[in-house]
Amino acid sequence: MVRTEIRSLRPSRLEMSRLTMALLISLLLHLGTWGGYQFGKKLGWWQRLHAPAWVQKLEKKITPVPVAKKDNEPPVVFVDVSHAEPEPPKKTKYYSNKNSQAANPDASKDTGQPKLDGKQKDVPKTEDVPTLPKLQPTAPPQQPAPETKPAEETHPHDPMSLGDLKLSKPVEPKTADQKSDQPVQRPRTLKEAQAQQQQQLPGQKLQQEGGVRRQRIWSSLDAKATAFGDYDRAIVDAVTTRWYDLLDSRRFAMDRTGKVIVHFKLKFNGSVEELQIQQNTVGELLGYVCEESVQEAAPFGKWPSDMRREIGANYRDISFTFYYY
């Protein structure tokens, strides 16, 4: 006869008691340790303790060396450069499509930034450029109606009559003092007006304290030409032109001052995504005009190969700031 013994997997009462006791002891130890740590922290015990000398030496060996901050961080603010320089500045937060170095007409102590006597403190600009006027299309000049002359009688003995060929009185050339009858050609659109101005963005000169030792007949900022300076200048021109077009076409009452910051992602193919207003102090309507000026000016051109290589990504975060004065 074979005896088979089957043992139950259910723990006995003794085993359950031991397990419960172990759990209670573990819980009390954890609570006691945590409570002691918090109590000592509150009384400042742990700040007074010092690690052993061998531990301190080990910490010094494994402590990573802090990385020095790079001084050649890329500039992030686009500025309009009217006087180009061959050499870029060593360090600047401004970039453009041309190099520029800080200068003043009167050399003075070097504070790192030129002194500018403008009227605004928001946009980095070194000279006043008039805002494009609100132009109305000029009517084309009216063509004079052809005059009907009575048929002239031919006189065979008239020496001035040679059949169908007639001699006329020569027209005397007009002197420089005489005014021309032809109307002056005025620009009919904002684009034509902008083309007639110097290739600079409209705006007021910046007000800024300072002074530099580099002397020029004009004031200028430190700006560095980048691989995408020309590309960004084209975007600024397109958005600015569209902004003025919208303001002129809808005849907004420019009775409010402030700014609007529009943020968007510029893709490598020139398209715009995630367009949104980050800040608006001039009201919903004027803020909408700024948003539409970017939306309607897009899509922009594709990135040049060197620009895409330097950026190292498929998009850029762009912030456009519009100021109403």
Image (cartoon, rainbow, N blue to C red):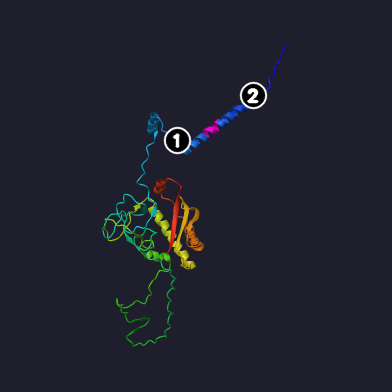
Whole-number angstrom distance, CA of label 2 to CA of label 1: 41 Å
State the residue position of label 1.
46
| Callout 1 amino acid | Trp
Residue 224, image x, y percentages: 34, 52
Q: Which residues are magenta?
A: 29-34
Question: Does label 2 or label 1 sit earlier along the sequence?
Answer: 2
80 or 56: nearer the eye? 56
State the residue position of label 2.
15
Residue 32: in sight, yes or no? Answer: yes
> In this rendering, is residue 260 above or below 63?
below
117 or 24: nearer the eye? 24
Classified by dominant secondary structure, the portion drawn in magenta counts as helix
> In this rendering, is residue 46 above or below 251?
above
- Residue lying at 50% horizontally and 62% vertically, measured from the top left: 283
- Residue lying at 65% horizontally and 23% vertically, measured from the top left: 14
198 part of magenta stretch: no
7 or 225: nearer the eye? 7
